[in-house]
Amino acid sequence: MKATMQVIVMKFGGTSLATEEGRGHAVARIKAEREQGHSPVVVVSAMGRLGEPYATDTLLSLVDEKHCGAHEKDLLMSVGELLSAVVLAARLNEEGVFARAFTGADAGIITDAVDGAATITSIDTAAIKAALNEGTVAVVTGFQGLDGTGVLHTLGRGGSDTSACALGVALEAKRVDIYTDVDGIFTADPRVIKEARALKTITADELFQMARHGSKVVHAPAAELALQSGAHMRVRNTFNEGEGTEVVSLNAFKPDSVATAVTTVSDITRLRVRLPYVKDDPEAHMKAQTEVYRLMADESISIDMFTPMNDRLVFSVPAKDAEGAVASLSAAGFEVASRANLGKVTLVGSGMHGVPGVMARVARCLMDQNIDILQISDSHATISLLIDEKDSIEAARALHRAFGL
């Protein structure tokens, strides 16, 4: 690669590529980076959303998923990105910018063998570097790669963000720009809270916490990779010239408030699993608790907000997994009670670490709205509240107001 040319990874989402206008904006962005002396590597998602002909959900609607194997679903879902890569590369060539479409395999992306939710394990960048040395724009299919035996796997919804961030790390890119149809990362979902505002800066830790607690702006594994690698990332709007939101390390940015954003997740079920009383038989209590965790892992069910108590274990699962979780636990002899139709609201902020009184403000805020808190979990940068789903939006709005977001 020419020493004077710095790699910029540019990822364009489905709404950015769904129309001729959107693709025109993407091409203009790519040309602008080249004019600044950069070598763009472009990562693409499938074009559009459900109902549009090449969107991932539209492709999935072509088959009855009950009769389509996991590998076949991966093959079907990979088609949308392939179409996007070819169409955008052709558009770039039409504009006088020599470009080549790369599949995940062409780009050297190697994954593990998990269907539908694979993890990138390594990237051989030789083919992309060769293209860049020739002055070619590499347009790479996001969301996919091959395992060690040559079988295709996809990375889970939003996985093109992860493809972009992983390529950025592997290529030692100057930055990774995630282009979407909004002006950056907001303090809340602007479709739900009209007062939400776009952030100029956010720490990588806060972005990761937002992603894992419900925000859909950036794929959670991509946010985690940005946090671990220190990769320079921005989230920008394809359709305007705004600078978007810059993602920085906590060491490079000191938050001036305790909270940065609020997120919501719906369709949650809480499970209460009876365990042997800990004071009667500590060993049996711990053995039973460990067995619960194992059973959920065997069923590939992600558990959240787990709270061990003297005679029970309380945790939440996605509503779609609740029936299977209860069946598995009951078959193993556990007594299980469930409560459905719950939601989780999470206050996110690196500035809350070590600050007294934040939880008191949160509790007062929800009490003033007559919203019952069923369960609480926290970390150095989050406070999550399990509440009735019908109260989730009002709770998020109240927290957004109370913390001046």
Image: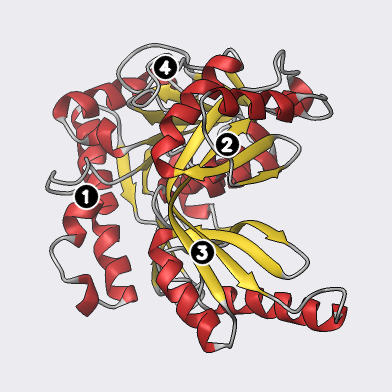
Disc 4 target residue? 35
Q: How many marks?
A: 4
x 32%, y 67%: residue: 74
Dot 3 or dot 1, earlier in sequence: 1
Answer yes or no: is residue 200 visible.
no
Q: Which residue occupies the foreground of this view, 381 or 60?
A: 381
Q: Position of residue 59 (x, y in %)?
A: 18, 58
Give the Cα distance between marks 3 and 4. Answer: 32 Å
Q: Amino acid at mark 2?
A: Thr
Answer yes or no: is residue 175 visible.
yes
Q: Secondary structure at mark 4?
A: helix
Give the Cα distance between marks 3 and 1. Answer: 21 Å
Give the Cα distance between marks 3 and 2. Answer: 34 Å
Q: Secondary structure at mark 3?
A: strand
Disc 1 target residue? 83
Q: Position of residue 192 (x, y in %)?
A: 36, 26
| Figure quadrant of the N terminus | top right
